[in-house]
Amino acid sequence: MEKLMEILREIDDTIDFEKETALIDGRILDSFGMITLVSELEDAFDIQIGASEMVPENFNSVQAMWEMVTRLKETG
Amino acid sequence: MAYHTGMYLFLFLPAVLLLYQAAPARHRWKVLLLAGYVFFYLVSGKLLLYLLGTTLFTHYIGLRLEALQSAGRGKKEQKRVLAFGICVLLAVLGYLKYYNFFAENLNKAVVHFGGGPLLAARHLLLPIGISFYTLQAIGYMADIYWKKIPAGQPLGKVALFLGFFPQIMEGPISMYGQTADQLWQGRDIRREDLSRGWLRIVWGLFKKMVVADRLYVLVQNVFSQHSRYSGVIVAVAAVAYTVQLYMEFSGCMDIVTGSARMFGVTLPENFRQPFVSRSAAEFWRRWHITLGVWLKTYVFYPVSASGLVKRWNRFARKHCGKYAARLGVSALALFPVWLCNGLWHGPRWSYIFYGMYYFVILLLEMAFEPVGEKIRTLLGLKADAWQIRAVQIFRTWLVVFTGELFFRADGLRTGIEMFRSIFRGFSLVPLWDGSLCMLGLDLADYLVVFAGCLAVGAAGFFKERQTDISVRLENTKLPVRWACYYALILAVVLFGAYGIGYQKVDLIYAGF
C-alpha cells in the first residue's frame, strides 16, 4: 500500500489521496493522470492493466486501486 | 415520422403505450421491439433488414465470445473474434456511409495525376440511425469481451437494446448495462413516469419548435447565400446555428428521454448545460455526452492501454519530463478519438476538419494550462474567481461558435471563406441598423428567440445547482403547477415556428 501511495504522490502531491473517494468521478484525477498511473502501477507491481480495467470504480480511491492491483496480481 | 411530428406524438407513442400496458408483463418487451421495427420501417422501409442483420450478427459474435471464454480459450482467439465482429459492422457502415466520399476523392487524386476515374459513384441508401445502433452494437461486443455483461443474453434483449424506438433516430448512444435490463423488465406504466415523461416531451418541443426552428430561417439564409454576407452578420449566423443545433438536438433528446420515461426507462443524458463550460474539454463532457463516453470507453482507453502509448509514456516521463509526456500521451490517445468523432458525423472534409479542430484546441488548452496558471497567480486571482470564470467561458464560446461555423458550412472551402469574411469590414453597426431583420426574422421573432433562450438558460441555471424545475413544479400547488404546464403548451402552440411562413425542419442529427 505504501508503494502505491508513493506513486500517487509522485503523480500529484497536491491531492489528499488518503481521503478522496471520487478521484475520477470528481475529476480530481483526469484521464491523463489515470494513464500515467496505469504505467506506473504496471511497472511497480508487475501487472498488466487492460482497457477493461480503466473504469472509474477502479481508480476512485486508493482502496479501489489497491483492490484492483491485488486482484490482478493474483490472477497473473 | 420524426419525434416532433403529430403522427409520432399523437398516434404512434400513445398506441404503443396502450399496447404495452395491455400486454402481460412478460410479453411487453415484444411490444417495444415490434414498435421499434414498425418505427424503423416507417422511416427506412426495407432497410430494416440492416438492423435485423446487425442484431443477429452482434448476438452471434457475443455467443462466440462467451463460448471461447467458457472453454477457457486464450485472449488472442477472443480478440480475433471481437476484431472480426467490429470490422464487419464498420465495413457495412463504411460502405453505406463513406463509399461515395472515398470514390470521389480517390478519383480526384487519380485524375490529378493524369489517370481516369477508378470508381463509379453508387446510389446507396442509408438506414436511419445506422451510426447510432452500430456504435451500440460494437459496445455490446466489447463489453462481452471484457466480461462486463453476464453470459447468455437472450436474442430478444439484444434486439430491443439495438432497436428501442425512441433511440433509433438520434440516440442517446447507450451501453448495454445502462438500458437493456430496464427495457426487458416490462414494468407497469406509472402515473409519475407518465407525467414526468410528457412534461419533458413538451419541454423538448418548446426548444425545437419555438427557438431552433425559428433560428433555422436566419441560419439557412446566411449559410446558403454566404457570399452576400460578411462581418458581424456571419458571426451572428455562427452563433445562431450553435444555438439552433443545441436547442434542436437537446430538444429532441428531451422528447426521446421523455418518451422512454413513460415506459419507466431512464436513458442516459446527452447534455448538461454545455454553455457554462470553462474549456473545450469540459464542453465535450457536457455536449453529446453519450458519444463522448462511447469514444472514451471504446477508443480512448483501449488506445491508452496499448503498448505504444504506455511505452511512450514511460520513455517521455524518464527523458522529457512530466509536461512533455502528458502532451505526447494526449496527442497519441486523442488523435483517433477526434478523427472518429469527425468521421462519425458524416463523409465530408468539413466534418474531419471539425474533429481535427477540437483535437488541436484540446492539445493547446493542455499546453497552455501552466501559462494560464502563472497569469492567474500574477493577477492574484483564485481559480474560481468570477473574472477567471467569465474569461474562460467566453473563450470556450468563441471556440465552439467557430467550430460550428465550419461544421454547418457547405464544405471546408466555404467554411474557410465564411470565417475569413467575418474580419472583412467588421463593424457592429449591422446589429442595430435593421440588417438583422433582413435575414428572414422580424423583431418579434428575435424577441421570442431571446425569451426562449432565457427560459432554457434559467432551467439550466437551476439544474446546475442540482434543482430540477420539473420536480419542483410537482411539489407546488395544483393551480400554480397547471398554470405553468398550460403556459408551456401554449408557448409551443402560439410561438412554435410552424405553419404558414415557416419551413418544416428535419432533425439535424437524424442525418448522421
Image (tube, coloured by chain):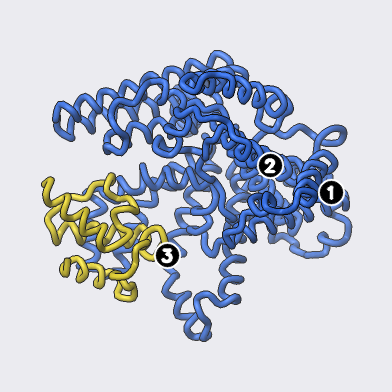
Chain colours: A yellow, B blue
- Mark 1 highlights which residue? B445
Q: Chain of mark 2?
A: B
Q: Amino acid at mark 3?
A: Met
Residue B219 showing in the rendered view? no
Q: Secondary structure at mark 1?
A: helix
* x then y, percent, for residue B227: 74, 46
Question: Could you tell me if the residues under marks 2 and 3 are in contact, i.e. CB atoms within 8 Å?
Answer: no
Residue on which disc 2 sits: B199
Q: Is residue B217 left or right of residue B379?
A: right
Q: Chain of mark 1?
A: B
Q: Earlier in the sequence, mark 1 or mark 3?
A: 3
Q: Which residue sits at x=48%, y=75%?
A: B372
Question: Could you tell me if the residues under marks 2 and 1 are in contact, i.e. CB atoms within 8 Å?
Answer: no
Q: Position of residue A7 (x, y in %)?
A: 21, 68
Q: Which of the two labelled residues, at mark 2 and mark 1, occupies the earlier sequence position?
A: 2
Measuring 50% from the left and 76% from the top, which residue is drawn there? B383
A4 in relation to B91, above or below: below
Rendered location of residue B113, percent (x, y): 44, 33
Dot 3 corresponds to which residue?
B366
Marks 2/1: CA–CA distance: 24 Å
Q: Disc 1 and disc 3: Cα gap in Å?
A: 40 Å
What is the secondary structure assignment of the residue under circle 3?
A: helix
Q: CA distance from mark 2 to mark 3?
A: 40 Å
Question: Mark 1: which amino acid?
Answer: Asp
Q: Nearer the viewer, mark 2 or mark 1?
A: 2
Q: Front-most of B116 and B338?
A: B338
Give the residue displayed 51% in from the left and 19% down from the top.
B24
Instruction: Classify mark 1: residues with Cα within 10 Å, few (<14), some (14-19) or many (20+).
Output: some
